[in-house]
Amino acid sequence: MMSTGLIAIDSTILATAVPSVVKDLGGFSSFPWLFSVYLLAQAVSVPVYAKLADTVGRKPILLIGIGLFLLGSVLCGFAPSMTVLIAFRAVQGLGAGAIMPVSITVAGDIYTVAERAKAQGYLASVWAISSVVGPTLGGVFSQFLSWRWIFFVNIPLCFLTVFLLRRYHESVTRTKHTIDVAGAVTLTIGLTALLTALLEGGTAWAWNSIGSFVSFGIAVVALPVFILIERRAPEPVLPLWVFSRRLLLTTALISAGVGAVTIGLTSYVPTFLEKVVPTTPLVSGLALAALTVGWPLAASNAGRLYLRFGYRPTALIGSALAATGAIGVTVTAPLASIGLMALTCFVVGLGLGLVATPTLIAAQSSVGWSERGVVTGASLFLRSIGSALGVAVFGAIANAVLGSWNGSSVNGTAAASAAVFDAVVVAGLLTLLAAVFMPAARVQTESAPSGAAPEAA
């Protein structure tokens, strides 16, 4: 729960501080990189950590992730410029890439499917608390102290997490493993090139310039090469068999959609409220908290739904609710109302809570212990990819709209935010489409965790 809390708070605390960071360090057009580089580092490292967690054990990888997250937080807190801050966010992302999937995998190891419904309530409570604490702290630090404290606050939390983890023990059979360095490097190069092309096109260089052609060209070459490497690698970073099963494929696509919808709103709602309404960072943080409060509230009750009706019906209800909320955001945005924005974000959060939990548990429950880490990692990898590509696409849309206005003026920000909210609606509808094609899966109610590591407690 503490490990999950590190990521939960970090997912919302920065969004409310973005205007303050930009005011201090400059670089409004570059701020999407604060999210993209973090998510990219998280995405490309998740499959590596997930594989290592299946071979050397969960706890060592979790401790490594917490250490990297702590280091990145300290470095970010002292960053002197936007460029340096972006670089240090990558270090934070490398830590987050281990923390989130391994924490969820541990829960999958020590609880049965039926028990996970109750355990999810405890984990959801972490997100519920963090959803209020994160945006509120971000607003308080930005308004009354310094945005740098949004990173320094992680220091005591990381130490407390490590202290508590001393009570977690597992017995794992050590086996020799091969790290798919070629796959990890190729994937990083391809995704970095793609994100660079999307975020810098139309800003640092024209879309039809050499810079764009080179960036897109590298991505077009590197990503297919990555797939070829994965087909031959003895222990691939991202096993392609994960995407050969319909259940795993559709749940992974849903996870990507969840990531895109989440990052689109958390990145642009605070900026929209602070610049267009206008309001203070503290109030915008509370408005954003509505989304992250709705998510855990729904997730804590999702277990009752999928145990009674099944994974697919619950996912359909959740994705439909999220898409409806996203439409509400874009329809009510021109009214510039804090209350309406909070309400529609809350509806989106309810939907995401209902779709994210059952789809992940459905994927976990379809495999044994030795594959559960990889499957969990693949799902969260796609969520991170959805977030990373989402914020890049949304950033490209926002920068293109801002280019036709007077930079980051109020009218320009309003128009750019409206365009981004429209794009979030598209992401929500695509997520709903993936849920429609999700196959029905039987909800297992085994009395003991299937294939769990002995002495895991």
Image (cartoon, grey):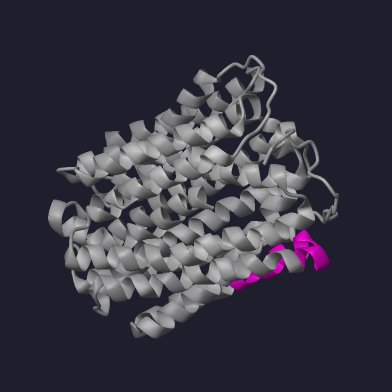
| Image quadrant in which the C terminus is located | top right
Reply yes or no: does residue 306 show up in magenta: yes
Q: Locate residue 427, reporting x and y percent.
A: 53, 60
Compared with residue 354, is residue 78 higher up or lower down, i.e. above or below? Answer: above
Compared with residue 126, is residue 197 higher up or lower down, i.e. above or below? Answer: above
Label tally: 0
Residue in view at x 23 percent, y 72 percent: 275
Residue in view at x 65 percent, y 59 percent: 120
* Horizontal arrangement in the rendering, residue 253 relative to residue 45 (left or right): right
Residue 201 appears in the picture as rendered = yes
Q: Locate residue 384, reporting x and y percent.
A: 50, 46
Q: Locate residue 185, reporting x and y percent.
A: 46, 24
Residue in view at x 61 percent, y 24 percent: 56
Instruction: Please identify the quarter of the rendering in which residue 288 is found.
Output: bottom left
* Horizontal arrangement in the rendering, residue 408 relative to residue 47 (left or right): left
Reply yes or no: does residue 222 show up in magenta: no
Q: Locate residue 12, reporting x and y percent.
A: 39, 60
Of the pair 138 and 328, the residue shown nearer to us: 138
* Horizontal arrangement in the rendering, residue 6 relative to residue 245 (left or right): left
Compared with residue 274, is residue 27 higher up or lower down, i.e. above or below? Answer: above
* Magenta-drawn stretch, dominant element (helix, strand or loop): helix
Of the pair 233 and 15, the residue shown nearer to us: 15
Instruction: Please identify the quarter of the rendering in which residue 375 is found.
Output: top right
Residue in view at x 44 percent, y 62 percent: 130
Of the pair 134 and 250, the residue shown nearer to us: 134
Q: What stretch is highlighted in magenta?
A: 305-322
Residue 205 appears in the picture as rendered = no
* Horizontal arrangement in the rendering, residue 361 relative to residue 83 (left or right): right
